[in-house]
Each structure stands twice: as structure tokens, then as C-alpha cells.
Image (cartoon, rainbow, N blue to C red):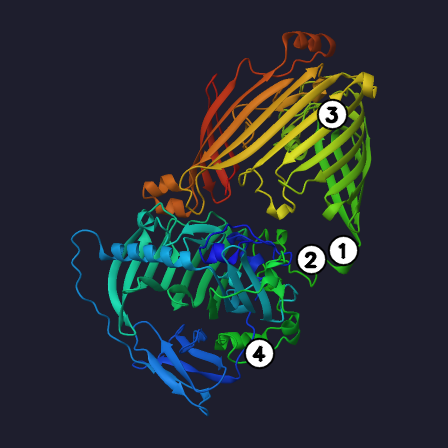
Amino acid sequence: MKPLAASRFGLPGHRGGHAVAGWSGASGMGCLALLLVWLGAPPVFGQVLVEGTVRDAATGEPLPAANVHVEGTYRGTITNEDGWYALRLDGLPAVLVVRYIGYATQRRTLRPGDAGRQDFDLEPVAYELDEVVVTGEDPAVEIMRQVIARKQQWRAALQRYRAEVYNRFTLENDTGIVSIVESLTEAFWDRERGAREVVRARRRTSNLDFEAFLPAAFFVENLYDDDVEVAGYRLIGVTHPDALRHYRFTLEGTRVLDDRTVYDIAVRPAGRLKSAFEGRVAVLDEAFALVEAELRPGEAFLFPPPVRAYEVTYRQQFSRFGGDFWLPVDFRSEALLKIDVQGLLTFPLIRIRQVARFTNYEVNGPLPDTLYRKIAYLTIDSVAVAADTLLDRPGVAVPLSGREAGAYATIDSTMTLEKAYRPRGPLAFLVKVEQEDDAGRRGRTGRDRGLRPSLQPELWYNRVDEAHLALGLGATVGRHLALRALGGYKTGPNRWTYGGEVELRGGTRGRGWLALRYRDNIEPRFPYQIHERFFNSFGVLTGGTDYFDYYGNEKWTARAGYHLPFAATRIEVRYNRERHFSVERTTGYSLIGSGADPRPNPAVEEGRLRSLGVRLVFPVRAHPGDDDLPLPLGGQRRVQLQIEHSDPGLLGSDFDFTRLWLLAEWRFETFFRRRLLPMALDVRVVAATHTGTLPPQRYAVVEAAGGLWQTFGGLRTLESRPYEGERVLALFWEHHFRTVPFELLGLRRLAGAGLGLIVHGGHARTFVSAARRDELAATLGFTPRRPEGFHHELGLSLNGLFGLFRIDVTKRLDAPGLTAGLGLARIF
């Protein structure tokens, strides 16, 4: 959640902030989610209504976003797309002023009895296109240098303000308007204490059935800011202190506003690789202030597939308030989003139009201290909201267009967003678009709030279990109790598998949990992260090598954990009571023929294992949607640490060891950080060590990622089976150059299709002492697979093939070896 002043008005602050009634912010890729949560506005309104149209006197065409205000006050509004305005005045007489750049300003005195319709026909003023001879620096550069300097001066003097804000979002699909959300708030900002908003009224089409109260000014970008957000990403603004290094400004001509010259300046990024704006700004002479801006992201602002099109245009006007403070009068934007997964999953066009208006500014005056005694950013004016009539009164909001008024009249509760944005294609059944209910819960019925059942199947095939089929039945009872039972059958000798778990959640905000679990099963002898038993089954059934080794384990586990309120960290303590036993290979069957002699399943050191363990995960997010994107789609920033201790004297275990295991995954942004998707280095470190005598079923591994299907986090030139060891050290890295190499080569079509280059590498070694290897060979007939030294590899990937895949070519450096394979594309 971003403070109004910090993110919209470019003032000192940060992009954190106070929560708004339990709502958490969304990125640009979450456009569909934002449809449900926009609202906000003003307090006291006058009783005299004046309305009418503003037109071009020469052509009769309506002038959208013309400024209409009361002279001598900061009360005003703008015309809608049809040129219609409506404004409530405190009384008459009053002087109405109508301005539009390039047209002669009109002033009209309204006397008692003049309320009602007042139309304005503005006379166009010819462009002043004096020839400009440029011998060195374009004049626009010096003009913008003055704009930037003046901005620093007046912003330093701005201490606080309040304003009445109106905001409207109109959502459309391929066929027309889907829904409308309007809000009225009163916005406050203080340099030291931050921002607040008070909701005065809201209105929405009847197909949006939610009760949240949300701000208006918060959703308005300020194009005068140093940084301006587009779809969740910050682009450098055209008045940033370093803007002259990031933009090329060109003087295109001049216009007139109130007999003063307005410079029209074209804006474009200084380089084709810079994620920056293009468009134009209008600068008022002598004041060197922006009075108008129309900006859109440049060609380097590329979304990766499956986004096939993302276009957004921002328009905004500014005026002088409280002296020399140039603040927004309005904000208008239009965003278009098209999502298509190779025709397999296609969403209807998403178009969002936004119009916002600021009025009744009070600059550097006193603000109510009561607002700042509250932690919440948003306050609800319950009396005004209960009346819920302000937005129904003409002159309070920017008038609806004819299309929008028609949508209010025809859209009913049956025209849901789920219907409007129902995807098409073979994979459409995988996606469900959900709306929030009145309590803010997503897609749940009343029954879900009590008992919520779930099913989780287990299905695989391997050389020990043969065919395994089990079904887990889970149920969440209320908010605090979770139950799960599992039962299954396998065709191998150990025919039955079963287990269950009880978990109790509680503590502050449900941060803590206690759980008890039992499971009697055959399980992999070593931990795995990038391979799964289900997918391993396909290799076994087609005559390939079984990736895993197995052992029997009858296991009780007691867990107690807590989500720490700081640093988004989770800590868990475990007690394990296990009985380990060896199992043998039972089948060599495959679909392409039986009779093959697959490798035997090695024995393990049998006995009772009693251990205490601690698991620490940093950072963890409170909600799954706030977490980093899963590998390999995007980068991670997470560290996991596990410690396990088994002691015969203390716990009555047959084993005596302490083992330590570390997994660190981190993303570093490297070059072109101002782009929509900066270049990034993803690093994964795996390390393990121990004391005492570690049984093979507690060895750590370096996973093999070789073969046709490859993924990050394993050695691509290592096939079939992983490396194992008592001690392990592995480093995996990928540097994503994005589409930049193709952009540099001028291959815009490839870049536009989302194709990029990745350089990747892996370096790993496992350690088992010679004495321990001899002991395992003599007692178990087992020799851990390990490299003689460090395994080194280096590769190149073509990323984004068909928007879904990547092709990897990897060369082993310490020994002969070259592999090629496919994997899921790294999208973000």
C-alpha cells in the first residue's frame, strides 16, 4: 500500500504505508483483481447547479476534459468525453471560467436566476509555429531544465494540503461496458505525518456486490512525480532530477493559454532499451510549470507472454494552487490488456478507463489531528455513506457519458465478472474467475465457513511399490482445526499405506500451529525438490532408470510452529519417532517390455530413529498470493535452514548424529533496473554437513536435471540419479538477459514475442569419507554416487519459446558432456 503523497505526488516518503480496511495492493498483472476494489470522496456541496457543454466554436465538436472553475476559488470540475460538465456552487453571483489549451478562455458572470444550463463555445487560437533554428541543444532541454528546477523549489515549500477527490473506473470487455465503480473522498497529506483519506460516498453497478470502502486519490498517478507507476512498475518521470539523462525533449510548437505561451514538447526515451515514457507535455512560459501531460510507456516496456498486448495512456492537467504549487486538476487513463496462452487459454479483452477530478484544494492549512491518531489510512464517514446519495446528485461527480449512463440502467446482478471474462480455449476449465462476497471472502459459500473438505490423490509407479494409489481426505473445521486421513493400496509386497494428521491453529492472528502426524509408507531415501514421484513414474514405465531409492518408514511426527510477526519468518520445531527398514526391488516391468534388470534397491541402516529438529524459513509471506513466484517461472528470495539431532542417550535412538541443511534462493536485479523487467541473476545454494555417523537415509543430494526435461536447481549434465553425500555444497545460477540482446540486434519481432537469452551454470560436489564408503559397501552393498571433484557446467538458453518453454544447451567443463533439453520458460 503506497502513501498518497509519496507515490502520487512525489513527496518525501516510501512505498510502504498503512493498510486500507484489510485490502492489500495488487500489481499491474492483477488488473482483473483490481476491478473489484476501487472506490472513494467530498464533503459539503453547494446547492446551485450549473451544467452544460463546452464545444469548439468552429466545428461544434465537444471538448473533453475542459477546465471549468469558479473564479477566486479552488472549486471546479472537468467535462466528460461528451464535453458535458456539471458543477454545484455555494451561491450566485459567481464568475465561471472555462479554459482549454489552444482556445481563448471564457469568463461568464452568473447572477441569481442564471442557474441551470450554461453552454460555452470556445474560439480556437491559432498555433504559433514560429520557425526554430536549432544549432546545438534543443530549446526544449533548457525549458525542461527550468521546469525541474522550479519543481524542486515549490515542492520544498509544500507542507500539507487537503482536497476533494472524485474517481471513476469503467471496465469493458470486447462487447461493451462490464461494470462501473465511483468514489468520493476527502484526501489529506502532511509532509511529516503522511496521507489519509475519508470516504464520503460510493456508487457502483449492481453486478459488483462487495462492501469494501476504498480510497480515490490513492489510485491516481501524478505525472509531475519523480517516479510514476505503470502496472505495478516504476518508470522515471519526465520531471525527475535526472530526467534529462533519460529523455530526449524536442520543442514541437507553441499554443496560447490566457494570452500566455504554452510550449508543446515531445517526449521520448533517450535510448531504445530504456523503459520510460513517450508522448508530450505542455509547459507554461515564465512559470515553467507543466499544465498538461499525455504519456504512455515506450517500446521497451515489454510484458512477457502470456500477455499479448498491454497498452496504457495517461493524461493529466495541472493548475496553480495556494501560490506557486502546481497540483493535479484531473487524471485520465485508458489501459488495455490482452491475455492469450497460445490459443489454449484466451481471455476477453480487458479495458479500464479511469477519470479522476481534484477540487477545493486547501494548501498549507491546518489538518484534523483526529485522523492522524488512527493507524488506518482510510476512514469511513458513516453518516455520509449511510445516506449514500451524494453521487446521485448532479454536479458532484464528473458527469457520466451516454454509454456509462446506459450501463447503469441496463447492468444487473446477473451480469457477473465471471461471465464477462470467462476464458476460452482447451484449458479454460482450469481457470475460475471469482468475485468477493460481502465479507471479502473469495469464491466460498456459507457452508465453506464451517466444514471445508478436500481430496488429495497420490498416484505413482516405481520398482519397489509397483503401482501405488492412495487418497487423502482433508477437512478444515472452522478457523482452527484441520484433519486429514490417508489410505491407499499398492501392487507390491507392502500392499497397504495409511496415515493421518491433526493440526490445531491458533495464537495471535492464527500465527501458531500444533500438529501430530502418523504415516506408514515406503518413501524415497533422500530428499528431493525438483523431481516428483508422479512424473518419475513415466520414466520407469518407459524403460528408464528409477530416479529414487526407497526404504520403509513407520513414522510419528509432532510439530509446533509459529509465523513470527517480524521479518516474515516461520520457525518450526519437530519431534520424529521413526522405524526404518530396508525394502527390495519387486519389479522390472515397463510398457516397452519386461525382463530388464533394473538396478537393485539398496538396503539402509535399520533401526529406531528418534530425533529433534528445527526448521527456519526466511522470508515467508503471510498469504500465498504475496509470495515470490515459484521456480522456474520467476525468482525467489528465501532461505531455509534445518537442524536435526538424534542421540541414543537422550532420545533412545539407534542413531547418533547431528545434521545441518541449508537452501538459499535469491534474486538480484542487475542491469537496466528501470525497465519493466530488469535483467536478473537468480542464485540457488545448497549446503549440508553433519557430526556423528549419518545413516544413508539422511544423506543430502545434488539433484540431476539431465534428460529431455530440465529445470533450474539441478545439474543439467547429470542424468538418471543424483549425487549423494554426508556433506554437500552446490551453487546454481542463471542470468536472465531478457529480450535485450534481440533488441540490440534490431530484432524487434523476436523481442516482442518474448524471446530472451539466459546464461546458466552449476557447480557442485558431495563428500563421503573413504572409511564410510568402505563401511557402506561392506555392510549394505551400497556406494553413494558422487563426483571425483567439483562438477562444473555452463550453458545457454533460448527463453520464451511459444511463450511457455525454453531450450537449454549445457556443456560440462570438468569432464566430457554436452546436453540439450526443454524446460518451462522463466517468465518473470
Circle nearer the viewer, 3 or 1: 1
Mark earlier in primary sequence (4, 2): 4
Q: Which residue is mark 3?
A: 464
Distance between the Cα atoms at labels 3 and 1?
40 Å
| Amino acid type assigned to the residue bearing label 2 in the image | Arg
Circles 4 and 1 in contact, beta carbons < 8 Å: no
Circle nearer the viewer, 3 or 2: 2
| Amino acid type assigned to the residue bearing label 4 in the image | Asp
Q: Which mark is residue 441?
A: 2
Q: Which residue is mark 4?
A: 392
Distance between the Cα atoms at labels 3 and 2?
45 Å
As helix, strand or loop, the secondary structure at mark 1 comes to helix
Circle nearer the viewer, 4 or 2: 4
Circle nearer the viewer, 2 or 1: 2
- Asked whether the viewer can see residue 440, the reply is yes
Mark earlier in primary sequence (4, 3): 4
| Amino acid type assigned to the residue bearing label 3 in the image | Val
Distance between the Cα atoms at labels 2 and 1?
10 Å
As helix, strand or loop, the secondary structure at mark 2 comes to loop
Circles 2 and 1 in contact, beta carbons < 8 Å: yes
Q: Which residue is mark 1?
A: 448
Circle nearer the viewer, 4 or 3: 4
| Amino acid type assigned to the residue bearing label 1 in the image | Asp
Distance between the Cα atoms at labels 4 and 2?
29 Å
Circles 4 and 3 in contact, beta carbons < 8 Å: no
